[in-house]
Amino acid sequence: MAIPKSKTLVAFCTSAALLVMLAGFALPRSASRSVDSQQTAEQGKLVFEKYGCFVCHGNEGSGGVRNKNAATGGFVNALTYTSRAFKDADLKERIIRGPTPVKKADPHGSTPPLSMPYFRGAIPDAELNDLVAYLRSLTPEEGEEPKPVSKERPPVPDFMLGDNNCEICHSVVTEHFKTNPHYGADATRKGTSEVIVCSTCHGSGKIHAASYGDPQAIIQFSKE
């Protein structure tokens, strides 16, 4: 007995749907890994912004932030290709290990003002993993160009906006200040309000920090 065409069509569609379902179950491992990796990188971008990494490393790690007398061309390193030089564990350690004196272009010149802050114990391991995933996502594949960078910068996080927390971005310089004759010159003064800090001479750093380190938003001193 011949099978009606309508039943043949239904059977064909059912088989095709089953094949699509089976194919769907076969794909998820690589596909889900890709989706998971993308989601982790997106979470890492939030971590990157939460801890103000963009203030020194540029929006989305693209660089372009001046760092006078730094051997890296007078700028803070961009992060676009950083992940190629480190394994995950090494990259995490580099992020959290704290103040690292930046190599000077002129060994006899001034200390580059920007240096890594101390994040050990401040960034949970889960966030570090997300941050590393984000840094890896910035690195293009061989033969490809870096991803275009958004022109919109996120707001500077609140913890960077205090008047007397200059060590967050200027840790090496503020530590070096302790050897300066001006440091401790308040020995005869009374009360914590009289303690000499960076803002005593340079003025409030709040606007300076909120302006992504704009040098015009702080009182500067030079030999001239």
Image (tube, rainbow, N blue to C red):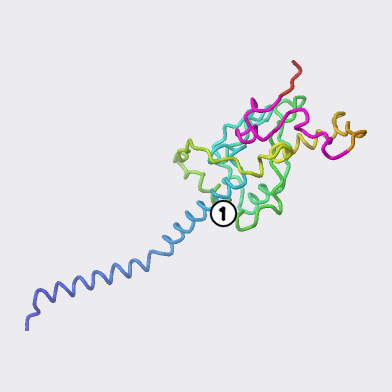
The residue wearing badge 1 is: 130
Task: Specify whether residue 188 is painted magenta.
Answer: no
Q: SS at mark 1?
A: helix
Residue interval drawn in magenta: 191-219
Q: Tell me the quarter of the picture where residue 160 sits.
A: top right
The structure residue drawn at horizontal position 85% and vertical position 29%, both measured from the top left corner, is 182
On the image, the x and y values in percent for residue 67 come to 66, 30
Q: Which residue lies most toward the right here? A: 188
Task: Pick whichever, 27 or 170, lies toward us.
Answer: 170
On the image, the x and y values in percent for residue 140 come to 48, 43
On the image, the x and y values in percent for residue 89 come to 64, 54
Q: Which residue lies most toward the bottom here? A: 1
The structure residue drawn at horizontal position 60% and vertical position 58%, both measured from the top left corner, is 126
Task: Pick whichever, 146 or 159, lies toward us.
Answer: 159
Task: Pick whichever, 8 or 201, lies toward us.
Answer: 201
The structure residue drawn at horizontal position 55% and vertical position 51%, both measured from the top left corner, is 44
Name the quarter where the C terminus is drawn: top right
Q: What crowding class fits label 1: few (fewer than 14 Cα within 10 Å), some (14-19), or many (20 or more)?
A: many
Left or right, residue 122 beside residue 185: left
On the image, the x and y values in percent for residue 87 come to 61, 51
Task: Specify whether residue 211 is painted magenta.
Answer: yes
Three-letter code, disc 1? Asp
Task: Pick whichever, 21 or 142, lies toward us.
Answer: 21
Identify whether 139 is placed above or below 26.
above
